């Protein structure tokens, strides 16, 4: 217990050291606010290096250390604004561990609004995690003054005010643009652990181009990766290493926290003293390599039991595993989208337990399993790194290997170490999900290699779920893996697992994933042309329930969701001619498809998507058969009444996704009236968030209707409905540049389409292609996800003023 630590002879001397603040009754966490200012940057970059000064101001004294990242190849262009921006966000990650302890954190350099929001959100999340995991739970690294902090529930745990002094002056330098990447290229954040080794083996076997990226953290932590890195460097193309000194910066920061024991470096523990935002420090170090090599996918190796939402004395949190969870993957993928970086981040092993991962690695990739090292107290013996054989990770690995029929000696354990690990395992257990620990103990007991106390032995029973694929919509959904690698991976898993189960109504039921409709469900953060049209459910799916679709909820479900989210998307389209080559419902389909893809890519709680309004103001196309038009009054009144009704349901922010420019006057009028009468936020997006970027893709000047852009987007998601053999160019010649619909100086005027184009086309659809369509969809989705995340995170009051 913490109280027993008082007996440590060093504590009395240091507990009252100068500068330690007394706890305030009104601000119970003020006792942790010990640093006046933490300053990061400005970053200095070379072609293969970045360094960022970290400065701490405390009690009138300033101290400094440099955070350094070194690359084995050139990844930066020193005078390029994009390189400066990337280097700044990389260097900022270490600081996110200290929001609980600083009055102010100043980030110098180029940061755009997406960067600022990301840093703010991740710092706040980390502050809550650190408060719960490092101060409310037992922590041997702390002094007694902070043993009994009250478990207060706060809206915000971070004490730090974030400042970006260069942003206003420099913001014009950061130009939003798409980073084109290749989804055939996969980077793996690599180490000597089983997760990254298995991820590499799986992707290599199914024929994918893999780039193992090792992050060489200064200090002994790198020892865990040495065996694997040497093997990969000698045998695997595209292997890369990045050296960073974050370990030294973390230790330096601990010396500025007076409630941390000064002898922290000598204490043996399987956990870090304070920090919980660590994976991102490594992860961002890989991003410059992804940019240079055009890599489109970034994999981290995390399994089923790392995605956790829990509560500690009423405070909800992620059990200290946020940066190893699926929530982290999705948050990073959304951040990349908001930046225009076409990178998706995920783990391919989330449906697997730790023990099943070890089993597949041993049985299928023994040459990789030989490189496995999970111990953090390793030592050097000759040319190899060897495990300590004493820590919790060692006894866990030894236990799992023996349970599945593997040989711990393969990865360096001696007979004596194996014997001691098994003895300690029976006595102390392991830090593993409850089901996994019970199954491990049962398996070892059945093999006769461990003896448990009588009562504990009687409680043991086999938990076969641990060795099955587990499909859970929150932790490990089928659509958490991109479509094109889903089936080959599940085929391999099922060769080694004892079946598959899916979570339904808090129970696991037998399930065969390869026959599920969800095997074809699009992956949220990538454009896949197959099976990507929005489908309304015809039967209940055990795997995927689109809880963001308003129309598919029951009233009790709607009541619950409306307590979680106050933002809704309303797609509005049109049924009108789109030339002889495109379907009449192009605008309606596109609006609904865009709204659903945006909602799916957003964080939890996701915005609600209202049912599509298919009909629009299309009288100007009436001379073309098939067009169905309603009046401005009808559309405006319909949207107004829908908006007022959603407001009564609790919606405070309504974003109208307009798929047809002719609807704009009616929708803008409805938005004004809803705002006036319901006093909620209402906005209409008819492409304003993305048009400036899309125009750079289109080759055709004057591409107004059914031309290059709309045909490209249709070719991407509904190629079977596009008749390219009937597509022909018709770009209207306007009598005045001020009447040109595509001119930046053009006035808004109205005309019947037939007078401008006999085919109904105003543009050049012959220049369309699916690749352009993919880029356009990505741009639209990226900007709208960024907008929705901004709106969702703010109250109505905050919408009118800056958050930082």
Image (tube, helix red, strand yellow):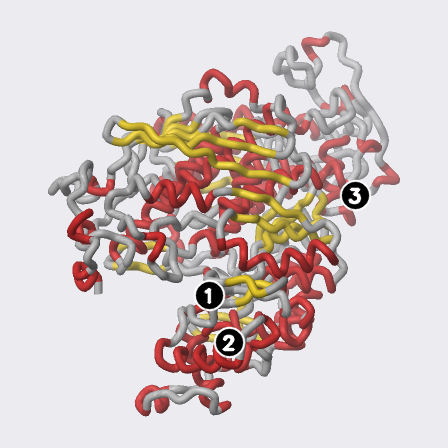
| Residue 374 position (above or below residue 65) | below
Of the numbered discs 3 and 1, the one sitting upstream in the chain is 1
* Relative image position of residue 503 (x, y in whole percent): 48, 70
Q: Which residue is mark 1?
A: 305
Asked if the residues shown at circle 1 and circle 2 are in contact, with their CB atoms under 8 angstroms apart, the answer is no
Q: Quadrant of the C terminus?
A: top left
Residue situated in front as seen by the camera: 634 or 166: 166
Residue situated in front as seen by the camera: 670 or 264: 264
* Relative image position of residue 413 (x, y in whole percent): 54, 74
Residue situated in front as seen by the camera: 157 or 410: 410
Marks 3, 2: nearer the viewer: 2
Q: Residue at left 62%, top 55%?
A: 535
Q: Quadrant of the N terminus?
A: bottom left
User: Which image quadrant is residue 438 in?
Assistant: bottom left
Q: Which mark is residue 498?
A: none
Report if residue 521 is visible in the image.
yes
Q: Which residue is mark 3?
A: 722
Q: Residue at left 32%, top 28%?
A: 62
| Residue 274 position (above or below residue 39) | below
* Relative image position of residue 504 (x, y in whole percent): 47, 70
* Relative image position of residue 313 (x, y in whole percent): 24, 59
| Label 2 residue SS | helix
Judge from the rendering whether residue 133 lies leftward or rightward of residue 755; answer left or right.
left
Q: Residue at left 22%, top 52%?
A: 143
Residue situated in front as seen by the camera: 559 or 19: 19
Judge from the rendering whether residue 199 lies leftward or rightward of residue 107; answer left or right.
right
Of the numbered discs 1 and 2, the one sitting upstream in the chain is 1
């Amino acid at each position: 217990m913490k109280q027993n630590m008082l007996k440590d002879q060093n504590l009395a001397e240091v507990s009252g050291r100068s500068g330690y603040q007394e706890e305030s009754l009104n601000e119970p966490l003020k006792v942790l606010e010990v640093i006046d200012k933490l300053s990061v940057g400005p970053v200095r970059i070379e072609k293969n290096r970045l360094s960022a000064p970290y400065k701490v101001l405390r009690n009138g004294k300033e101290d400094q250390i440099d955070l350094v990242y070194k690359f084995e190849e050139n990844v930066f262009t020193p005078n390029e604004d994009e390189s400066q921006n990337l280097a700044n966000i990389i260097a900022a990650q270490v600081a996110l561990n200290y929001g609980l302890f600083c009055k102010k954190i100043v980030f110098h350099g180029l940061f755009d609004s997406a960067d600022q929001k990301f840093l703010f959100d991740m710092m706040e999340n980390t502050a809550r995690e650190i408060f719960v995991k490092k101060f409310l739970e037992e922590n041997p690294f702390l002094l007694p003054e902070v043993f009994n902090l009250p478990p207060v529930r706060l809206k915000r745990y971070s004490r730090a005010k974030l400042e970006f002094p260069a942003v206003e002056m420099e913001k014009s330098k950061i130009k939003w643009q798409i980073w084109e990447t290749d989804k055939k290229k996969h980077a793996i954040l690599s180490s000597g652990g089983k997760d990254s080794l298995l991820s590499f083996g799986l992707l290599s076997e199914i024929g994918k181009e893999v780039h193992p990226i090792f992050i060489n953290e200064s200090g002994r932590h790198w020892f865990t990766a040495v065996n694997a890195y040497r093997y990969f460097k000698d045998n695997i193309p595209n292997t890369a290493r990045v050296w960073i000194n974050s370990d030294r910066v973390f230790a330096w920061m601990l010396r500025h926290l007076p409630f941390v024991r000064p002898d922290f470096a000598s204490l043996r523990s399987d956990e870090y003293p304070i920090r919980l935002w660590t994976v991102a420090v490594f992860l961002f170090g890989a991003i410059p390599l992804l940019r240079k090599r055009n890599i489109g996918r970034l994999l981290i190796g995390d399994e089923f039991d790392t995605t956790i939402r829990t509560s500690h004395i009423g405070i909800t949190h992620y059990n200290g595993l946020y940066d190893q969870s699926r929530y982290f993957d999705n948050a990073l993928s959304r951040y990349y989208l908001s930046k225009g970086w076409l990178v998706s981040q995920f783990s391919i092993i989330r449906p697997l337990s730790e023990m099943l991962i070890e089993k597949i690695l041993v049985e299928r990739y023994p040459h990789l399993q030989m490189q496995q090292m999970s111990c953090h107290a390793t030592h050097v013996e000759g040319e190899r790194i060897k495990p300590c054989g004493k820590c919790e990770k060692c006894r866990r690995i030894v236990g799992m290997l023996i349970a599945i029929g593997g040989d711990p000696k393969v990865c360096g354990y001696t007979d004596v170490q194996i014997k001691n690990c098994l003895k300690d395992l029976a006595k102390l257990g392991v830090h593993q999900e409850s089901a996994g620990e019970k199954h491990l103990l049962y398996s070892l007991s059945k093999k006769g290699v461990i003896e448990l106390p009588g009562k504990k032995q009687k409680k043991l029973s086999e938990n076969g779920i641990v060795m099955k694929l587990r499909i859970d919509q929150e932790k490990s959904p089928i659509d958490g893996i991109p479509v094109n690698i889903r089936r080959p991976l599940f085929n391999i898993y099922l060769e080694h697992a004892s079946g598959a189960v899916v979570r339904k109504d808090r129970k696991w039921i037998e399930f065969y994933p390869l026959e599920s409709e969800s095997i074809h469900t699009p992956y949220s953060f990538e454009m896949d042309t197959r099976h990507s049209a929005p489908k309304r459910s015809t039967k209940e799916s055990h795997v995927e329930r689109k809880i963001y679709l308003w129309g598919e909820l029951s009233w009790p479900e709607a009541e619950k969701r409306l307590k979680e989210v106050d933002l809704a998307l309303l797609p509005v389209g049109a049924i009108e001619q789109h030339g002889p080559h495109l379907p009449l419902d192009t605008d309606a389909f596109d609006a609904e498809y865009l709204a659903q893809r945006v909602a799916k890519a957003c964080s939890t709680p996701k915005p609600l998507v209202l049912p599509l309004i298919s009909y629009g103001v299309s009288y100007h196309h009436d001379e073309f058969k098939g067009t169905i038009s309603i009046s401005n009054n009808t559309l405006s009144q319909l949207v107004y009444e829908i908006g007022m009704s959603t407001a009564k349901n609790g919606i405070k922010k309504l974003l109208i996704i307009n798929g047809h420019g002719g609807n704009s006057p009616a929708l803008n009028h409805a938005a004004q009236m809803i705002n006036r009468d319901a006093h909620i936020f209402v906005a209409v997006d008819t492409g304003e968030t993305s048009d400036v970027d899309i125009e750079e893709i289109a080759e055709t000047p004057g591409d107004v209707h059914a031309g290059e852009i709309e045909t490209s987007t249709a070719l991407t998601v509904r190629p079977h409905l596009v008749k390219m053999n009937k597509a022909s160019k018709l770009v209207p010649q306007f009598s005045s540049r001020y009447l040109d619909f595509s001119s930046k100086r053009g006035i808004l005027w109205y005309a019947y389409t037939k007078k401008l184009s006999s085919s109904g086309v105003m543009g050049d659809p012959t220049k369309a292609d699916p690749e352009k369509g993919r880029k356009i969809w990505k741009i639209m989705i990226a900007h709208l996800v960024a907008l929705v995340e901004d709106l969702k995170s703010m109250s109505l009051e905050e919408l009118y003023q800056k958050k930082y």
